[in-house]
Amino acid sequence: MAGGLVKHRALQRKSSHRRALLRNLVGSLIEHESISTTWPKAKEAQKLAEKMITHGKKATEASRRETLKFFFRPQEMWDKLSGPLRQRYLNRPGGYTRVLRIEPMKEDQAPSAILELVDGPKDMRFALTAKTIANLREKGHEINDMTAANIQKVTRFRPDAENDLERMIGEFERMAVEGDHGIDEIEKKKVYPKQQRSR
């Protein structure tokens, strides 16, 4: 049988291009802590990002060398991995990243996703949980089982999680009182150039 079990997505690129793409995605994720891309790219970059954060947590000479040869801007990335990210994920046994599916961002309808670092300032699930709690409080409803499970997930390893959650809930409640609901319309990115009519 030709081929066999495929352990990764080729992403329609040759291996050198695929590796450069993933190195760029992981570097952007470490720098910005949240990136938007297509879902297959996000799933592939997630594997490498988890490895790099584990290297940063170990902080040995061997892991430093592995990290330095992976990134295009190695020293900046190593300083962040072995510094603030190491402190953030010291007690977390794994699962440092999260992939959230979103509506297609581009007009070619490619499946899109957000790849983010958990327990950071841009943690989307933390914000969604806070917004859900604010909505439930506004309507006078009790917290259901799914919301309780989400609260437990987002606060489990996060330091000072209860205060952060209450602060964000208060922010959403203030926005609801002021009538601010965020962005009304999302503009999709253009993939194909506008064609000029020949006649």
Image (cartoon, rainbow, N blue to C red):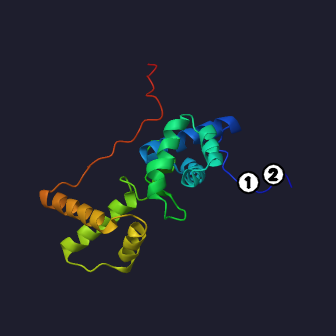
94 or 115, which lies in front?
94
Query: What quarter of the picture does the N terminus occupy?
Result: bottom right
Residue 104 is at least partly visible in this image: no
Outermost residue to the front: 61
Vertical order, 192 against 54 (above or below): above
Q: Secondary structure at mark 2?
A: loop
Q: Which residue is mark 1?
A: 6
Give residue 177's quadrant in the image.
Answer: bottom left
Query: Seen in the image, is 97 located left or right of residue 138?
Result: right
Q: Position of residue 66 (x, y in %)?
A: 64, 44
Identified by mark 1, the residue type is: Val
Name which residue lies at 46% across and 57% down: 100
Q: Secondary structure at mark 1?
A: loop
What's the CA distance linking mark 2 and mark 1?
7 Å
User: Residue 3: which disc?
Assistant: 2
Outermost residue to the left: 178
User: Residue 184: which disc?
Assistant: none
- Rate crowding at label 2 as few (under 14), some (14 to 19) or many (20 or more) other CA atoms within 10 Å: few
Name which residue lies at 29% across and 62% down: 164
Query: Seen in the image, is 76 located left or right of residue 144?
Result: right
Residue 161 is at least partly visible in this image: yes
Outermost residue to the top: 199
Q: Position of residue 39 (x, y in %)?
A: 53, 51
Query: What quarter of the picture does the C terminus occupy?
Result: top left
Name which residue lies at 36% across and 74% down: 147
Identified by mark 2, the residue type is: Gly
Name which residue lies at 45% across and 56% down: 87
Vertical order, 95 against 83 (above or below): below
Q: Position of residue 25 (x, y in %)?
A: 53, 42
196 or 64, which lies in front?
64
Q: Pointer 2 and pointer 1: residues touching (CB < 8 Å)?
A: yes
Query: Seen in the image, is 5 located left or right of residue 156?
Result: right
